[in-house]
Image: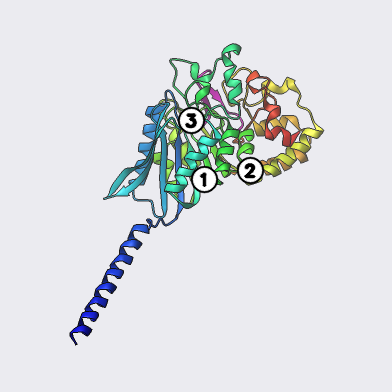
Amino acid sequence: MKTERKYYHLIKSVIVILFLSFGMTSCEKEDPVIVPTEQTVFMYLPWSTNLTSNFYQNISDLESVVGKNILKNERVIVFMCTTATKATLFELTYENGKSARKTLKEYTDPAYTTAEGITSILNDVQRYSPTKRYAMVIGCHGMGWIPVSNSKSRSGLRTKMHWEYENVPMTRYFGGLEPQYQTDITTLAKGISNAGLKMEYILFDDCYMSSVEVAYDLKDVTDYLIGSTSEVMAYGMPYAEIGQYLIGKVDYEGICDGFYSFYSNYSEMPCGTIAVTDCSELDNLAAIMKEINHQYTFDSSLTSSLQRLDGYNPVIFFDYGDYVSKLCPDKTLVAQFNEQLNRTVPFKRNTEYFYSMSRGKVKINTFSGITISDPSTNRLASGKKETAWYAATH
């Protein structure tokens, strides 16, 4: 009897030990469960020589929106360079009745000007915030499709760029003011593609990014492009007003209206343009443009009559709709073009004037929400025939 009880207690002890052992083993191997959210809005702020204080303001403004407890099944992630060689990835969250910042990763010498570097940063975003939809807000780039290779020759060409003017209200430019801190649009597209992403939207908080050449380069990596045809004041996008429309169910018209409301009353310079491009419509737009280009050649004597949307001389960025209206005398074909252009750029808003650091306020007489550089003779636009848009339309 004693022997039976001895064996009973021995077996019971073994079972308890095994149970505890299995329990401890499973706890050690179990990884934290990360439930994918519905949307991640990624604010990407690579190094910019003279806009750092504005970036802090942008983050603070977006934080004020998060502080209203609007995040339901969304996350907001920020990458910001505090110097040319230091950056932080952090999350804007709502905790204990207010907004908070949660650091995710610190970077030393992040490669934010290469496709590989951009892919690596986006892979970090996906790792920390797996989600069904990604959207990207980019604070920097400000010369449209113009490649960095053109920038590198500027010192020899002595073309004075818009950010070089002093004692005037400041607008935005990409990265640092030197080419080594700048990134080509094609490089950005490759970086996003290699990360296996297609953005819900890309919002460019930068000058000159609502360009048909830019949109065509990015059409395979984003559904929508939001940007300005002209220079954007250094303050940037008014996130306190439009942030609620960027998160969750995106309200593109609300974004445009919020931007217009803010900048039509902006005390420093009440000027601004914004537009939304539906990238799924760009191939249809290119097909009509190709038909027009095959039939007609632009009369260069009309260049001075085109609506300029920049401060450069010669002009680089012309209003696209105005250009086609003067290129094509076929009213039926122009009507078809305009119908397609309205589908491609469904939302747009503009103040009466746009502002350029080099020219001050310039009147906007016609506005289609997107620019083109086809008729430009500016040497900075000399590479226009090498763009994907030009190849698709000529």
Callout count: 3
Q: Amino acid at mark 2?
A: Thr
Q: Is residue 168 left or right of residue 156?
A: left
For the N terminus, the image quarter is bottom left
What element does badge 1 sit on? helix
The mark that comes first in sequence, 1 or 3, is 3
What element does badge 2 sit on? helix
Residue 357 place in picture, x, y as percent: 50, 20
Is residue 245 or residue 38 the one in the foreground? 38
Asked whether residue 121 is in view, the answer is yes
Name the residue that disc number 2 marks.
344
Please report contact status of discs 2 and 3: CB closer than 8 Å, yes or no.
no
Residue in view at x 53 percent, y 28 percent = 142
Vertical placement of residue 389 versus 37, above or below: above
Q: Amino acid at mark 1?
A: Tyr
Tell me how far mark 1 sits from mark 3, CA to CA. Answer: 21 Å
* Residue 361 lies in the magenta stretch: yes
Please provide the residue range marked out in magenta: 351-367
Q: Amino acid at mark 3?
A: Cys
For the C terminus, the image quarter is top right
Q: Residues within 10 Å of mark 1 (few under 14, many from 20)?
A: many
Q: Is residue 258 left or right of residue 362?
A: left
The mark that comes first in sequence, 2 or 1, is 1
Please report contact status of discs 1 and 3: CB closer than 8 Å, yes or no.
no
Residue in view at x 57 percent, y 19 percent = 152
Q: Is residue 7 left or right of residue 36?
A: left
Name the residue that disc number 1 marks.
252
Of all residues shown, which one is farthest toward the left? Answer: 2
Is residue 75 or residue 298 the one in the foreground? 75
* Residue 363 lies in the magenta stretch: yes
Asked whether residue 264 is in view, the answer is no
Name the residue that disc number 3 marks.
140
